[in-house]
Amino acid sequence: MRTDDLSVLKDDMVAFIAGHGLRRMRAYVPDDVPSVMFEDDDPDAWKDFVEHAKAANQPFLTMSEVILEPEDIATLIGQVRDQNYPDHDLSELEMAQDLTQHVGKVGYLQLGFTHGGVVFLYETATDWYDQFQGLMETVSELGRIIVDDPDED
């Protein structure tokens, strides 16, 4: 069951981790770090993940969150407008503007721990955060396209 704001889930995670005698380190494990993603469709699967860390005798877990900030939306809208100039009424712009209703909400959470030289990760995100990330990737990809001008030869 996905929710619009992961703040309550984050609070539950913090309490559950502390209740298991583990500490939290605020850190994000980037995509370029080799890792194993914990997969389970159960909404409470993160509890199993924490219990695996405890069973592996880990003293702490990494924890990262993403809160949608007004600057994030402003940047996205600006980039979408730049990419779609002069046609500002494209669906990407509308989707970016719709995301303003989620400013201040937690959209992404990541837990992690290492064991045996491997980083294990648990991630969860809201639908709107996935949409935000998708738009950011689309805009970035469009910005990298090089237009070949045949008149320059």
Image (cartoon, grey):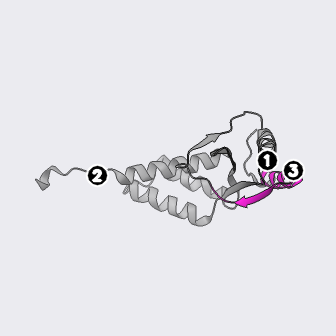
Identity of the amino acid at label 2?
Ile
Label 3 sits on a secondary structure element that is: loop
Determine the residue positioned at 73% across, 33% down: 41
Q: Residue at x 77, y 45 (%)?
A: 53
How far separated are the C-alphas under marks 2 and 1? 50 Å
Q: Report the residue that reaches farthest toward the bottom.
A: 71
Q: Which residues are magenta?
A: 9-28
Please report whichever mark, 3 or 2, sits nearer to the chain's N-terminal start: 3
Residue 10 belongs to the span the image colors magenta: yes
145 relative position to 136: left or right? left
Q: Residue furthest front?
A: 116
Q: Mark 1 or mark 2, which is nearer the start of the sequence? A: 1
Q: Which residue is mark 3?
A: 20
User: In front of the other: label 3 or label 2?
Assistant: 3
Q: Is residue 105 left or right of residue 50?
A: left
Q: Is 15 rendered above or below residue 46?
A: below
Rendering quarter of residue 35: top right
Q: From the image, which quarter does the N terminus lie in?
A: top right
Instruction: Write down the residue under mark 2.
Output: 146
Spot occupied by residue 34 in the image (x, y as percentages of width and height): 56, 45
Of 140 and 13, nearer the camera is 13
Task: Name the spot of residue 122 as percent of width and height, x first.
Answer: 69, 44
For label 1, count other residues whose C-alpha is less than 10 Å away and answer few (under 14), some (14-19) or many (20+): few
Residue at 22% from the left image edge and 50% from the top image edge: 148
Residue behind mark 1:
57
The amino acid at mark 1 is Asn
Q: Are marks 2 and 1 in contact (CB under 8 Å)?
A: no
- Real-space CA distance between mark 3 and mark 2, rounded to the nearest whole angstrom: 52 Å
Do tag 3 and tag 2 residues touch (Cβ < 8 Å)?
A: no
x and y percentages locating residue 72 in the rendered image: 57, 62
Locate residue 23, reporting x and y percent. 80, 58
